């Protein structure tokens, strides 16, 4: 399997397709069923953000392995309006789009590592990593 | 258009979700189900999600919405067959689905509806 892959996120069908790709990669990395489910769910939340708030974008996936452990890193990139107050956007229940406001906070809880960069007018990049 | 089938079983409606849900499908199901509850005067809804290996906040919200809408229409909803990995993930995501009845399988869900509705049927 390739060590890296990328996928455009431009429609709800792309989110379904992405979930399948992330699931297959997580299985390939030897993740437990619970870890697979957590990662796929986090990815689904972030892909929906890319679509609903970023006006579409892409997901990049990287398979990680070193001598001690295996993992998966997913990067969600959009060139949308950006997030003016990242700390506020991370809070559960805060939403500007009529959702439940669980996307960013939930994705963080479901990941081992979480990183977000956003610039108003330029876009948002969220990176999550989950180790086996 | 793609639709999720709704089966009538006596006083109840059975919805078995067997496809990977995308957003439009979830919205269509909410509308179809509320229409059927009113039309069939159903008193209970069994929502079988045993085939779903992911429930994100969007699908979780759909489940909570269906339960609330059904309640307003005088019908009880039981979510049946949630996979353990999905249950663990939902709670960690921050969506414990409080107020939504659950059962391990369709048979137990049916028994729960009979018990809750009792002589009312």
Image (cartoon, coloured by chain):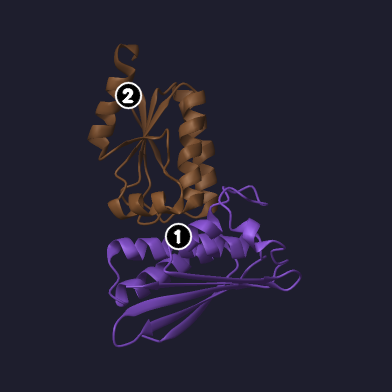
Chain colours: A purple, B brown
* Label 1 residue SS: helix
Query: What is the number of the mark on residue A89?
Result: none
Q: CA distance from mark 2 to mark 1?
A: 42 Å
Task: Judge whether B100 appears above or below A95 on screen.
Answer: above
Q: Quadrant of residue A20?
A: bottom left
Quadrant of the image containing the N terminus of chain A: bottom left
Front residue of this view, candidates A113 and B63: A113
* Label 2 residue SS: loop
Furthest residue toward front: A87
Query: What is the number of the mark on residue A109?
Result: 1
Which of the chains bears the disc numbered 1? A
Q: Position of residue B36 (x, y in %)?
A: 47, 30
Regarding residue B2, the answer to whether it shows in the image is no
Front residue of this view, candidates B108 and A66: A66
Front residue of this view, candidates B74 and B5: B74
Regarding residue A101, the answer to whether it shows in the image is yes
Query: What is the number of the mark on residue B10?
Result: 2
Left or right? Give the position of B99 relative to B87: right
Q: Nearer the viewer, mark 2 or mark 1?
A: 1
Front residue of this view, candidates A67 and B106: A67
Task: Judge whether B4 appears above or below A12 on screen.
Answer: above
Q: Position of residue B121 (x, y in %)?
A: 33, 15
Residue at the spot x=43%, y=40% of the render? B97
Residue at the spot x=25%, y=40% of the render? B104
């Amino acid at each position: 399997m390739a060590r890296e892959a990328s996928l455009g996120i431009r429609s709800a069908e792309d989110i379904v397709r992405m979930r399948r790709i992330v699931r297959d990669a997580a299985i390939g990395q030897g993740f437990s069923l619970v870890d697979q489910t957590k990662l796929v769910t986090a990815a689904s939340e972030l892909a929906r953000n890319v679509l609903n708030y970023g006006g579409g974008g892409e997901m990049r996936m990287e398979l990680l392995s070193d001598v001690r452990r295996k993992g998966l890193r997913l990067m969600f990139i959009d060139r949308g309006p950006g997030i003016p107050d990242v700390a506020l956007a991370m809070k559960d229940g805060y939403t500007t789009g009529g959702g439940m406001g669980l996307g960013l906070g939930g994705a963080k809880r479901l990941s081992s590592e979480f990183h977000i960069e956003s610039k108003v007018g330029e876009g948002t990049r969220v990176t999550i990593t989950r180790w086996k | 258009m793609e639709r999720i089938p709704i089966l009538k079983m006596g006083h109840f409606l059975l919805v078995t979700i067997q496809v990977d849900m995308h957003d439009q499908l979830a919205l269509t199901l909410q509308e179809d189900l509320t229409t059927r509850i009113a039309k069939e005067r159903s008193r209970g809804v069994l929502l079988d999600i045993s085939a779903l290996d992911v429930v994100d906040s969007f699908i979780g919200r759909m489940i909570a919405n269906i339960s609330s809408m059904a309640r307003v229409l005088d019908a009880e909803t039981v979510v049946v067959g949630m996979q353990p990995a999905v249950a663990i993930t939902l709670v960690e995501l921050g969506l414990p689905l409080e107020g939504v009845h659950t059962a391990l399988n369709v048979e137990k869900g049916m028994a729960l509806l009979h018990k809750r509705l009792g002589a009312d049927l």
